[in-house]
Image (cartoon, rainbow, N blue to C red):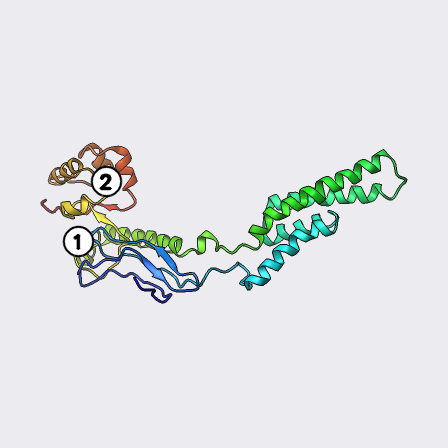
Amino acid sequence: MSPLPAVAVHHYLDPAGSGNGAAAVMEAGKEGGPVADRVGLDGRLTMSDVTHRRSPASRLGWPRILRIAARLGFVAVPVLSFGYLTGLAFLFAAIWLRSRRLAVAAAVYLTVTVVACALSQGEMNSTVNAALILQAGVNWLLGTAHAVVVQRRLFSTTRPAKEDPAVVAALARRQRREEARELLDRDPALAAELRIGRPDLPRHFDDGGLIDVNTVPARVLSRLPGLRPEDVERILAARLDPLGLRSVEDLIVTADLPADVAESLREVLVFSSTTTPP
């Protein structure tokens, strides 16, 4: 597949129903690669709401050379100050990353520095020597090692998970499913016209990947993860009952579907009042 420009994909469903799906959406950029795999049960692309993605950059948006310099500078603070400025460096990191753990670490480093400085004002004795050794061991050596670990987070080149296009797409599809469920409950006739839960039919409405257990053909059910051929046959038989299937619990009790399989599919299943013969 040739690189595609970095664009947003909004509720693409192949409205012509051609079935020409795509295995992945690729984005161009300095480090282009797959954004996410979103292929519908009928083989059509159903990825929705993928936001524009820039090439990987730090949270600060700094050039790479500046990020490297910042990393080296952060680690150099405890090294060059012999640990006396370690507490201030970690106080900055705690504020920047809003981390309570780093705030506690900063408090410890600052306490050691204050105690060592206070004791060093007097005559040299065993207590002063112990304080200086503690200062060197905790703030200088341990602080330097700690700084090496923290700088990876402080000047990270990876985007937070909530900003990742794959996560954005998954959350958007979850929202679409919730909206489609509400529409199905509120207006079944409109839901039927929009073909909610029917990925086997041409349509323009994106329901987020819902599957209507009572209306989809056997081939769609057979593509659901965890369903065996015998499970599909029991579902097809159970949905012909006058009461039909109305919930995941009905799948477990009436269609004898394994509970773990049924629960794993709860997110994508809906149960309309209309039943289609197998």
Q: Is residue 58 above or below residue 142?
A: below
Q: Which sits in the foreground, 223 or 188?
A: 223
Query: Which quadrant holds residue 101?
Result: top right
Determine which of the numbered discs, if any, sits on residue 154 in the image. none
Assign the N terminus to one quadrant of the image: bottom left
Query: Which quadrant holds residue 223?
Result: top left
Q: Which residue is mark 2?
A: 247
Where residue 122 sits in the image (x, y, percent)?
Answer: 89, 41
The local crowd at label 2, few if under 14, some if 14 to 19, many if 20 or more residues have their Cα within 10 Å, is some
Which element carries disc 2, helix, strand or loop? loop
Measured in 3D between alpha carbons, the distance from the residue under mark 1 to the one under mark 2, in whole angstroms, is 21 Å
Given the current orientation, which residue lies at the most extreme left position?
A: 277
Left or right of 61: which side holds 80? right
Where residue 199 sits in the image (x, y, percent)?
Answer: 20, 53
Q: Which sits in the foreground, 194 or 126?
A: 126
The local crowd at label 1, few if under 14, some if 14 to 19, many if 20 or more residues have their Cα within 10 Å, is some
Where residue 208 sits in the image (x, y, percent)?
Answer: 28, 54
Residue in view at x 15 percent, y 46 percent = 219
Left or right of 85: which side holds 165? left
Residue in view at x 26 percent, y 33 percent = 259
Assign the C terminus to one quadrant of the image: top left
Q: Which sits in the foreground, 84 or 51?
A: 84
Where residue 54 sits in the image (x, y, percent)?
Answer: 44, 63
Q: From this viewpoint, is residue 88 visible? A: no
Three-letter residue code for mark 2? Ser
Q: Which residue is mark 1?
A: 200
Given the current orientation, which residue lies at the most extreme right position?
A: 123
Three-letter residue code for mark 1? Asp
Q: Is residue 187 above or below residue 3?
A: above
Residue in view at x 79 percent, y 38 percent = 131
Q: Do tag 1 and tag 2 residues touch (Cβ < 8 Å)?
A: no
